[in-house]
Image (cartoon, grey):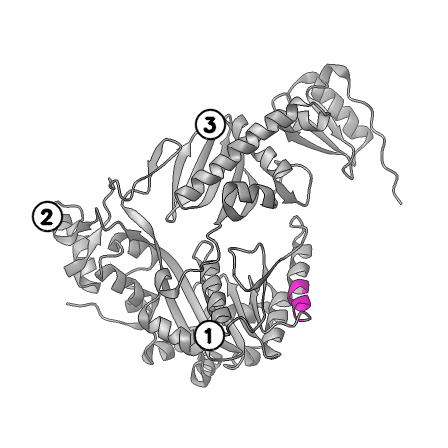
């Protein structure tokens, strides 16, 4: 057993700038970031590090230092900062922000919010205010694997349930990473919208796609894999499909989730978090594998696995499906059939992956901003007032019937404009909608993928009536729901022409 080092006391002259947390192992020396350049502070810390190299030195705000020093005034200061953070989360919820960004650059700071997929700067406080918030969030408001915020490396945590309730959230993830000139902190917000999961129609799936999902749901086992980039709404769709499973089985089947963290309440499901030291990639990987394997001993009928992120976790998920379970999961890939390629890269044999009884469906989705119906600009007005160039007009006409096409109003209107921290945001937009591809598997598709690859398999699927994300997007543009210029940045309107040789309209 290692002896706990005995550190020298902090000299009275610098007691307001340095505090020792000797409850940590190894002990942590907290230094006031605003006094870290003080000569006396630097000299003492340098001497300490030479004699005790095992000590972890980190910078902190005065609030955190005061809390560890036993100063009763600290609780009040900390409470004020916590209240400030809770108000920030509440404001983010009110405007539908999916993420909050706190950024420092030298002495300057930014608070930004992502609303409808776009980032808006809502406040520009000094960097010291940002860092006080960050140290309070990480050190006092999160379930974290480490006791203190360390600016010089990445750290992740989750907001404690006590503060989630006050902020009106179901969950919130904290993550930071040092950047040139400062720190980037991102907090993903998961609103608490009760037990009511959104419907497939409300999410934006087409009627044909909903009918296809209903057919796929009748298959009693196998993997249903959903892909898309971060922020593409995968977790919400999984929650919808889970709610449908529980409703379809009248609550007589056991659905267990393994999530990091659970992202929205699933009424009737058993939701379990992945418990791991997030500072260790190996520990996190083992935790996913262990979570999936242990869930198999809990009498499940269906599993929702937040992500199959490596060979070990994907092997556990595949094993669950091979054991006769209905499995929902996600991947970070660009299109549905690349899910199989990703698993092949993990090390799984292609012959196993090409089993249509094992992989039941492959789905990919994106989210596209929806236009405000109260102020959107019709095609004729956009053309006559030169809102779009002749080149843009020709391009859009080539791929979409422009009769009902509309464009975003950059000024917005009282219906769509939102105010947060004194700033108006979200001009011309009202929420987001799913743009998806759903690939049901069969013998022909899997044999084509196995022998000729992804592109050949996509051609096979499309030739049999598959609706591409490009077709889904073009339908929504033609309905006036999505601005064609915004749509083209998410999924080019000519993508099917590039992938499948589709010819534009004359």
Identify the residue shown where x is 26% and y is 40%. 414
Residue corresponding to mark 2: 384
- Whether residue 390 appears in this view of the structure is yes
The front one of 128 and 23 is 23
Residue in the image at 23% along x and 45% along y: 409
For mark 2, does the 10 Å Cα neighbourhood hold few (<14), some (14 to 19), or many (20 or more) residues? few
Q: Residue furthest left?
A: 384
Measured Cα–Cα span from mark 2 to mark 1: 46 Å
- Decide if residue 180 is in sight here: no
Q: Is residue 362 above or below residue 228?
A: below
- Disc marking residue 462: none
Q: At numbered mark 3, what does the secondary structure look like: helix, strand or loop?
A: loop
Q: Earlier in the sequence, mark 1 or mark 3?
A: 3
Residue at 67 percent across and 25 percent down: it is 66
- Local packing at callout 1 (Cα closer than 10 Å; few below 14, some 14-19, many 20+) is many
Residue numbers of the magenta segment: 290-296
* Disc number placed over residue 125 in the picture, else none: 3
Q: Quadrant of residue 94?
A: top left
Left or right of residue 187, residue 317 in this image? right
Residue 37 x/y as whole percent: 64, 21
Coordinates of residue 487 in the picture (x, y in percent): 29, 56
Point out residue 125 in the picture as x, y percentages from the top left corner. Answer: 46, 27
Q: CA distance from mark 1 to mark 3?
A: 48 Å
User: Taken as a whole, is the magenta stretch helix, strand or loop?
Assistant: helix
Question: Which quadrant holds the C terminus?
Answer: bottom left
Name the one closer to the observer, 498 or 247: 247
Distance in Å between CA atoms under marks 2 and 3: 43 Å
Q: Position of residue 302 (x, y in %)?
A: 57, 72
**Label 3 CA crowd tier, 10 Å (few <14, some 14–19, many 20+):** some
Label 1 sits on residue: 361
């Amino acid at each position: 057993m290692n002896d706990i080092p005995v550190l020298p006391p902090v000299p009275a002259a610098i007691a307001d700038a340095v505090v020792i947390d000797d409850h940590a192992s190894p002990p942590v020396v907290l230094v006031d970031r605003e006094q870290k350049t003080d000569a006396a502070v630097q000299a003492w810390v340098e001497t300490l590090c030479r004699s005790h190299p095992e000590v972890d030195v980190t910078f902190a705000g005065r609030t955190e230092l005061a809390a560890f020093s036993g100063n009763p005034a600290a609780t009040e200061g900390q409470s004020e900062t916590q209240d400030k953070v809770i108000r920030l989360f509440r404001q983010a919820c009110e405007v539908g922000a999916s993420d909050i960004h706190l950024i420092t650059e030298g002495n300057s700071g930014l608070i930004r919010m992502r609303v409808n997929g776009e980032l808006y700067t809502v406040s520009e406080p000094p960097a010291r205010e940002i860092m006080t918030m960050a140290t309070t969030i990480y050190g006092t408001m999160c379930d974290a694997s480490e006791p203190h915020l360390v600016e010089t490396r990445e750290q992740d945590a989750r907001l404690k349930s006590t503060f989630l309730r006050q902020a009106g959230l179901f969950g919130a993830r904290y993550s930071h990473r040092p950047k040139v000139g400062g720190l980037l902190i991102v907090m993903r917000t998961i609103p608490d919208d009760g037990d009511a999961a959104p419907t497939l129609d409300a999410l934006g799936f087409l009627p044909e796609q909903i009918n296809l999902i209903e057919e796929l749901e009748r298959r009693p086992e196998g993997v249903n894999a959903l892909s898309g980039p971060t922020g593409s709404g995968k977790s919400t769709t999984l929650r919808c499909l889970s709610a449908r499973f529980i409703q379809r089985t009248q609550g007589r089947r056991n659905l267990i989730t393994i999530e990091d963290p659970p992202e929205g309440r699933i009424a009737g499901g058993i939701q379990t978090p992945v418990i791991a030291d997030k500072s260790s990639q190996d520990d996190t990987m083992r935790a996913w594998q262990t979570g999936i394997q242990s869930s198999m001993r809990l009498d499940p009928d269906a599993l929702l696995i937040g992500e199959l992120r490596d060979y070990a976790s994907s092997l556990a998920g595949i094993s669950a499906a091979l054991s006769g379970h209905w499995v929902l999961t996600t991947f970070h890939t660009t299109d549905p059939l690349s899910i199989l390629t990703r698993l092949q890269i993990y090390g799984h044999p292609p012959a196993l992956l090409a089993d249509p009884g094992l992989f039941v469906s492959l789905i990919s989705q994106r989210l596209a901003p929806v236009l405000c119906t109260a102020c959107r600009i019709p095609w004729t007005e956009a053309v006559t007032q030169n809102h779009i160039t002749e080149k843009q007009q020709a391009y859009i006409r080539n791929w979409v019937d422009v009769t009902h096409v509309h464009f975003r109003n950059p000024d917005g209107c009282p219906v769509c404009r939102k105010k947060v921290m004194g700033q108006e945001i979200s001009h011309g937009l009202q929420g987001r909608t799913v743009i998806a591809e759903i690939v049901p598997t069969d013998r022909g598709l899997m044999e084509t993928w196995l022998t000729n690859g992804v592109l050949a398999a996509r051609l096979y699927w499309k030739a049999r009536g598959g609706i591409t994300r490009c077709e889904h997007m073009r339908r929504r543009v033609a309905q006036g729901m999505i601005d064609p210029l915004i749509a083209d940045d998410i999924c080019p309107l000519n993508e099917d022409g590039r992938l499948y040789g589709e010819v534009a309209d004359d």
